[in-house]
Amino acid sequence: MDQSLGARRNEDIALDLMKFIANTIQIAKPAAGSTGFGVSGAPHKTEEQITQILDLYARCKKAVEG
């Protein structure tokens, strides 16, 4: 089996795992206000959310690779 195909599969699995975890713990989803609009002054800035997602992906990839 081609090694590059195995690596790509691990990346896909890690990405799916990251999406599942991110959706479960609701990373990068705005908090809903009572009027249906996003709450201003959300606890996480966009940059912090991006960092969290990238860190989560790295952890998922490491877990998948063993």
Image (cartoon, grey):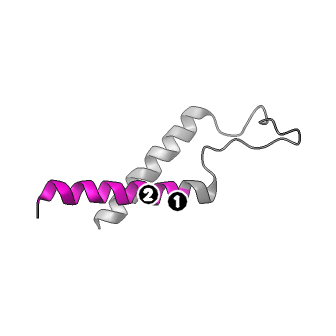
Task: Provide the residue span drawn in magenta.
Answer: 1-21
For mark 2, give the secondary structure.
helix
Helix, strand or loop under label 1 = helix
At x 34%, y 55%, the residue is 12
Q: CA distance from mark 1 to mark 2?
A: 6 Å
Up the image or down, 38 lies above or below 56; here it is: above
The N terminus lies in quadrant = bottom left
Q: Residue at x 28, y 63 (%)?
A: 65
Neighbourhood count class around disc 1 (C-alpha, 10 Å): few under 14, some 14–19, many 20 upward: few
Q: Residues within 10 Å of mark 2 (few under 14, many from 20)?
A: some
Residue type at mark 1 is: Phe
Residue in view at x 56 percent, y 38 percent = 48
Farthest-out residue, left: 1
Residue 6 image point, x, y percent: 20, 60
Prevailing secondary structure class for the magenta stretch in the rendered image: helix
Asked if residue 18 is among those painted magenta in the image, a careful observer would answer yes
Residue 51 relative to residue 28: left or right:
left
Quadrant showing the C terminus: bottom left
* Residue carrying label 2: 16
